[in-house]
Image (cartoon, grey):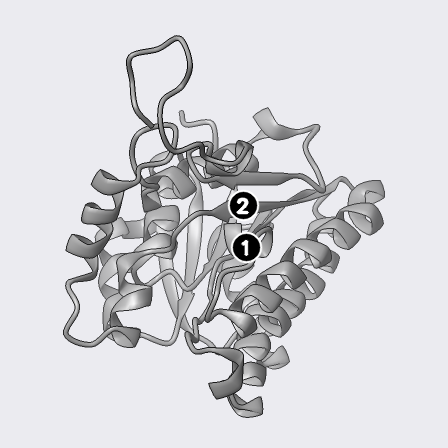
């Protein structure tokens, strides 16, 4: 039996990329998973591949009624809800000067409001079921600003703040709320914003030229492994915490040149 045997999870944005990797890892470790997305063909394919332990639901996470439907379906299909993974997000890249109010609010609506509605909707069933785990996927951009990502950075700072408030409010019910902050999302997230660019090749070149201290860039499987830990009882005393998946980049400023006393350049 896997360490997530008996767990019932909802994962948003699960049709591809990071969300798909999370759903697959949770099922591999014994959980049942309701996948939520708007990409029906991809979502249905992933759910079918995962078999009896998975179902797919077309749902807009910014719609309050959709959350009621999702929780009802997850519990009627698999049993009491134990885990929510708020992964769905969108990205907008442009300088502030060229970011419209509509662009800004569109990102905040999905990334912040969608996550808020998920957290709020999960409180009653998790409390009724004796507690559980909520995992919010933020970003390393929720710690450190990056040019051209004003809306995205703001939204991900917001996800981290919401996580900490929820942890303070919900701990008394046995509900843990933690935040996972990857250094980079899936390649699929960037591809629509960089037409004609081989995003995978671009990131591989960046990794070779300027790798993080651990020596490689992050992968969606790293995020999935962290989420599986936070969904498990092994993380029973973690709440309100940030899990920064950046290979050590944020541990300190990178020094270019020679480190005294060593023959290696960094």
Answer whether labels 2 and 1 touch (C-beta < 8 Å): yes
Mark 2, Cα crowd under 10 Å, few <14 / some 14-19 / many 20+, is many
User: Along the line of sight, which residue is nearer the eye, 141 or 38?
Assistant: 141
Write down the residue under mark 1. 138
Q: Residue at x 25, y 73 (%)?
A: 194
Q: Whole-Å distance between the Cαs marked 2 and 1? A: 6 Å
The residue that label 2 is drawn on is 180
Task: Give the percent coordinates (x, y) of residue 21.
Answer: 33, 48
Residue 221 location, x and y as percent? 33, 40
Quarter occupied by the C terminus: top left
Q: Is residue 20 above or below residue 191?
A: above
Mark 1 crowdedness (10 Å alpha carbons): few <14, some 14-19, many ≥20 = many
59 or 146, which lies in front? 146
- Would residue 246 be found to the left or right of residue 28 on screen? right
Farthest residue, direction top: 261
Q: How many marks?
A: 2
Residue 139 visible at all: no
Find residue 74 and report its horizontal and vertical position in percent: 51, 59
Quarter of the view holding residue 156: bottom right
SS at badge 1: loop
User: Would you say residue 135 is visible in this rendering?
Assistant: yes
Residue under the image location 29 percent in, 61 percent down = 16
Q: Using the image, tell me which numbered label, if any, was put on residue 121.
A: none
Picture coordinates of residue 141 (x, y %)? 52, 56
Q: Is residue 145 left or right of residue 239?
A: left
Q: Nearer the viewer, residue 225 or 266?
A: 266
- Give the position of the N terminus as an image quadrant: top left
Q: Nearer the viewer, residue 34 or 220?
A: 220
């Amino acid at each position: 039996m896997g360490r997530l045997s008996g767990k019932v999870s909802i994962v948003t944005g699960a049709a591809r990329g990071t969300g798909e990797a999370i759903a697959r890892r949770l099922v591999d470790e014994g959980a049942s998973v309701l996948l939520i997305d708007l990409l029906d063909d991809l979502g249905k394919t992933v759910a079918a591949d995962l078999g009896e332990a998975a179902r797919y639901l077309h749902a807009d996470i910014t719609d309050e009624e959709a959350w009621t439907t999702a929780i009802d379906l997850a519990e009627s299909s698999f049993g009491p809800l134990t885990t929510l993974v708020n992964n769905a997000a969108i990205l907008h890249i442009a300088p502030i000067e060229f970011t419209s109010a509509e662009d800004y609010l569109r990102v905040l609506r999905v990334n912040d409001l969608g996550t808020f509605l998920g957290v709020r909707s999960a409180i009653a069933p998790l409390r009724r079921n004796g507690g559980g785990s909520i995992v919010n996927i933020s970003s390393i951009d929720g710690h450190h600003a990056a040019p051209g990502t004003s809306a995205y950075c703001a939204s991900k700072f917001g996800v981290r703040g919401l996580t900490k408030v929820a942890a303070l409010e919900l701990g008394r019910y046995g509900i843990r709320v933690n935040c996972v902050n990857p250094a980079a999302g899936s390649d699929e997230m960037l591809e629509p914003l960089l037409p004609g660019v081989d995003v995978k090749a671009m990131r591989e070149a960046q990794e070779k030229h300027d790798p993080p201290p651990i020596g490689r860039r992050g992968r969606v499987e790293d995020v999935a492994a962290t989420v599986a830990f936070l969904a498990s009882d092994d993380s029973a005393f973690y709440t309100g915490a940030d899990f920064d998946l950046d290979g050590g980049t944020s541990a300190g400023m990178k020094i270019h040149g020679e480190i005294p006393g060593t023959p290696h350049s960094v």
